[in-house]
Image (cartoon, grey):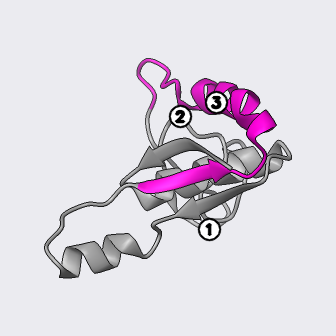
C-alpha cells in the first residue's frame, strides 16, 4: 500500500478515489474521521490520505491524478445535473454520484 494523494478537502479526496476506481485502481482513504475529531480537539485540519492498495499501480495512479487535477484556464466549478452537487472545475465526475460533467 502506498500514499498517492492527500488533501484536507474530503470532496476532493473522494473525487480522486472515484476517478481511480473508474480506472480499476483499488484504493483506501485514511483519516476520514480524523477531520471531525481533530476539530473537536482543536487540532485544525487533518489531511485525508488516499492510498493505492497495489504498489505497482502507484505510477499509473499519479499520472491519472495529475491529468485530472490540471485546472484549465478560466474553468468554473460545475453543478451536477443528476444530484445538484457543486464540483470543482478540474473534475469530470461528480464527487457525490459519479455522473459525468456533460451528462
Q: Say if 68 sits above or below 17 in the image.
A: above
- 49 and 84: which one is in front? 49
Disc 1 versus disc 3: nearer the observer: 3
- Residue 32 position, x and y percent, is 47, 69
- Residue 91 position, x and y percent, is 58, 40
Secondary structure category for the residue under label 1: loop
Secondary structure category for the residue under label 2: loop
Q: How far apart are labels 2 and 1 at the CA level?
A: 18 Å
Residue 56 numbered mark, or none: none
Residue at horizontal 71%, vertical 27%?
59
Q: Which residue is mark 1?
A: 83
Instruction: Bin the neighbour count of mark 1 within 10 Å (Cα to Cα): few under 14, some 14-19, many 20 and up.
Output: few
Queried whether the magenta region covers residue 15, the answer comes back as: no
Residue at horizontal 44%, vertical 17%?
73
- 37 and 93: which one is in front? 37
User: Is residue 103 visible to us here?
Assistant: no
Residue 90 numbered mark, or none: 2
Q: Which quadrant of the figure has residue 76? A: top left
Q: Which residue is mark 3?
A: 62
User: Is residue 65 visible to us here?
Assistant: yes
- Pick out the residue farthest to the top: 73
- Residue 87 position, x and y percent, is 50, 50
Amino acid at each position: 500500500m502506498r500514499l498517492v494523494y492527500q488533501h484536507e478537502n474530503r470532496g476532493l479526496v473522494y473525487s480522486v478515489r472515484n476517478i481511480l476506481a473508474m480506472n480499476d485502481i483499488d484504493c483506501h482513504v485514511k483519516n476520514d474521521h480524523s477531520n471531525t475529531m481533530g476539530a473537536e480537539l482543536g487540532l485544525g485540519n487533518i489531511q485525508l490520505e488516499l492510498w493505492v492498495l497495489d504498489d505497482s499501480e502507484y505510477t499509473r495512479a499519479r499520472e491519472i491524478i495529475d491529468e485530472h487535477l490540471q485546472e484549465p484556464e478560466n474553468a468554473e466549478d460545475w453543478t451536477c445535473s443528476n444530484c445538484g452537487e457543486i464540483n470543482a472545475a478540474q473534475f469530470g465526475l461528480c464527487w457525490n454520484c459519479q455522473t459525468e460533467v456533460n451528462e
